[in-house]
Image (cartoon, grey):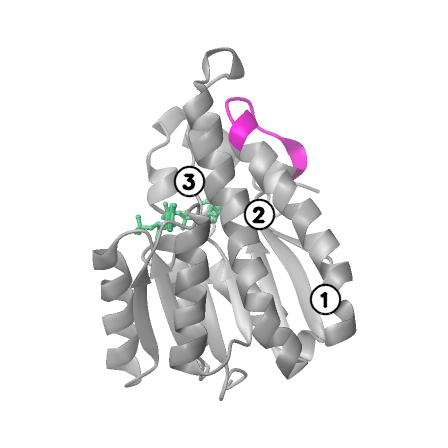
Amino acid sequence: MNRFVDQVAVVTGAGRGIGHAIAARLAAEGARVAVISRSEVNAQRTSEELNRQRPDSARAYAVDVADGQAVADLCGRIVKEFGKVSVLVNNAGITRDRLSMRMPEADWDAVVDTNLKGAFHFAQHLQRPMMKASYGRIVNISSVSGLVGQAGQVNYAASKAGLIGLTKALARELAGRNVTVNAVAPGFIATDMTAELPENMRAQVLERIPLRRFGEPEDIAAVVAFIASPEARYITGQVITVDGGMVM
Ligand code: NDP
């Protein structure tokens, strides 16, 4: 499929894991991709990999998504360098798990500022080129934790539930300009983020997944590619859960 020919996609957190798979999928289908990561080295690695597959399909940028001024500057640069932005995937995210009773305020702030405010920053600064073009797709990567909660994750669950509210409000704001805004809520996906969890916890999670396996980053990328494609034109303000049936 070549659903993103002549399109420009901005993918945050594309240095590793799910964001890497999303960037690779969109590039494989013809998009030119702004690969964004916190660290220069990871952004470069993804970008070089995509450029090996298809020359000139990616450029790397390092930014802290929580830094509003840095994101504003970067978005201006991306629009200048690529000429337009058709797709934004807000995927960058972190966890700082701990029971709420013992959670330092800094862990609350870091998670909410990265996962929720980071998405707001990019949506704020990239909606203008989409509105001007009367075309755009914004996809926010939430989590099943934002739908049903998870002990030890009050910060993370709040940030991911907040992303759902942001998705719906923004969908209403931008619908008249043919810009759709949706969220994808992954379940347990095998990445660096989940590799940190203890073995007994992973076994407990697996028990709760009807499809009997952890998800792969490509399982999320396939759904993001659909929801970000022109053919998903009548879907906005929705949350699509991709979790092997864990939450139903
Ligand atoms: P990883 O930890 O594997 O990768 C996270 C990516 O986000 C990295 O590229 C990292 O940059 C980037 N990032 C983190 N903080 C910042 C920041 N402040 N500024 C810019 N970039 C940042 O995570 P996953 O791939 O597992 O997760 C991706 C998204 O999916 C997250 O939003 C996560 O919450 C969500 N999700 C994941 C699930 C899972 O089971 N894995 C389940 C549900 C949701 P760098 O590479 O430079 O460090």
Residue 124 magenta-highlighted = no
Q: CA distance from mark 3 to mark 1?
A: 27 Å
Asked if labels 1 and 2 touch by Cβ distance under 8 angstroms, the answer is no
Residue 134's x, y, as percent?
A: 68, 80
Q: Is residue 183 visible?
A: yes
Disc 3 residue type (three-letter): Ile
Instruction: Name the front one of labels 3 and 1.
Output: 1
Task: Identify the mark at residue 94; answer none if there is no mark.
Answer: 3
- Identity of the residue drawn at 57% across and 59% down: 123
Secondary structure of the residue carrying tag 3 is loop
Frontmost residue, 79 versus 216: 79
Task: Identify the mark at residue 142; answer none if there is no mark.
Answer: 2
Name the residue carrying label 1. Answer: 174
Secondary structure of the residue carrying tag 1 is helix
- Identity of the residue drawn at 50% across and 33% down: 205
Q: CA distance from mark 2 to mark 3?
A: 12 Å
Residue 129's x, y, as percent?
A: 57, 75
Q: Is mark 2 within 8 Å of ligand 1?
A: yes
Magenta residues, as a range?
147-155
